[in-house]
Amino acid sequence: MESTIVEGAWEGHLGRGLAPRELQFVLAVVQGMTTKEIARAFGIAPGTVVKRLACAMFKLGVNRQGAMVAEAMRRQIITPLCLLLVAVMAMHSATDAGMARRDRRPSERRSAEMRLVRRAEVNELIG
């Protein structure tokens, strides 16, 4: 069984080229955290985060954090958890469970009848 790290809405896969700490920091970058925010969250110096991210970028062969995230996704080192949710829903519907397959009733059409009346007819109706 492959080890994974789940961080927010992302899942990181160990054993695919990045060290565990590098993977944790890449997952934090994916969630939009800055270097200082990552350092504060892990209780370490910002320089340590910079070094670990630099090592991760070197291993992935890129020079920018955005490219690091894209390359990690391309190599399937990180994956969004929404794909896991889609897979679960697909399996759920394949087993034909009732709640996921409950069909909605079509809404009943409500039609309103509007009748145009000339002024002469209005006077006849009133008087």
Image: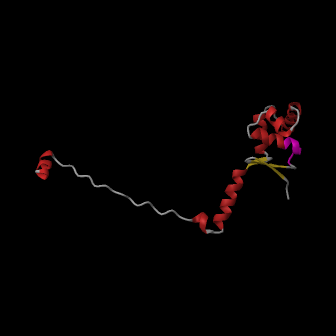
Q: Is residue 11 left or right of residue 92?
A: right
Q: Residue at x 81, y 34 (%)?
A: 62
Relative depth, front residue between 105 and 62:
105
Relative depth, front residue between 70 and 11:
11
Q: Which of the 4 image quadrants contains residue 87?
A: bottom right
Q: Residue at x 31, y 55 (%)?
A: 112
Q: Residue at x 88, y 50 (%)?
A: 15
Relative depth, front residue between 43 and 26:
43
Residue 21, image x, y percentages: 88, 42
Relative depth, front residue between 60 and 95:
95
* Residue at the front extreme, as displayed: 127
Total number of numbered labels? Answer: 0
Residue 116, image x, y percentages: 21, 49
Q: Which of the 4 image quadrants contains residue 113?
A: bottom left
Height in image: 8 above or below 37? Answer: below
Quarter of the image that includes the N terminus: bottom right
- The verdict on residue 65 being magenta is no
Residue 11, image x, y percentages: 77, 49
| Colour approach in the figure | secondary structure
Residue 68, image x, y percentages: 79, 37
Q: Residue at x 15, y 49 (%)?
A: 122
- Residue range in magenta is 16-23
